[in-house]
Amino acid sequence: MIRHIVLFRLAATDDAQRRDDAHGIAERLEALETQIPGIQSIRVDRDLGLVEGHWDVALVSEHDDNAALEAYQVHPAHQEAAAWIGTVVTDRAVVDYSV
């Protein structure tokens, strides 16, 4: 199994917009769990906001294997979600590892 972790920094400075954008990221990515074969789980959460400098949103997904992760990356539903996410974030960090 492969665990895929992505951290996002939101572009918006307004708290309400940041909340909406974080919700939009979660809604789009969590919907992929039932749309793309090979995904075991997807969870998206917003940072508590208690420590300055933390990333804003975290995605943790688990995939059957590396082939399933690669298929997820190029799947049209993921590409559509990623395109929208790209409009509301300034930066992202990614780590993939075997579990």
Image (spheres, rainbow, N blue to C red):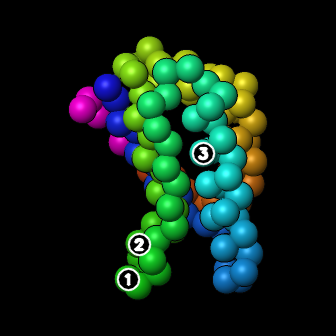
Q: Is residue 53 above or below residue 40?
A: below
Which quadrant is home to the C terminus?
A: top left
Residue labelled with disc 3: 30
Which residue sits furthest front? 34
Which residue sits furthest left? 99
Determine the secondary structure under disc 2: loop
Determine the secondary structure under disc 3: helix
Q: Is residue 96 visible?
A: no
| Nearest to the observer: residue 46 or residue 13 | 46
Q: Check contact, mark 2 vs mark 3: CB within 8 A.
A: no
Based on the displayed image, in which of its 4 quarters is residue 5 positioned?
top left
| Nearest to the observer: residue 86 or residue 43 | 43
Residue type, label 2? His
- Judge whether residue 13 is colored magenta: no
Q: Is residue 88 above or below residue 4?
A: below
First of labels 1, 3 by sequence position: 3
First of labels 2, 3 by sequence position: 3
Which quadrant is home to the N terminus?
A: top left
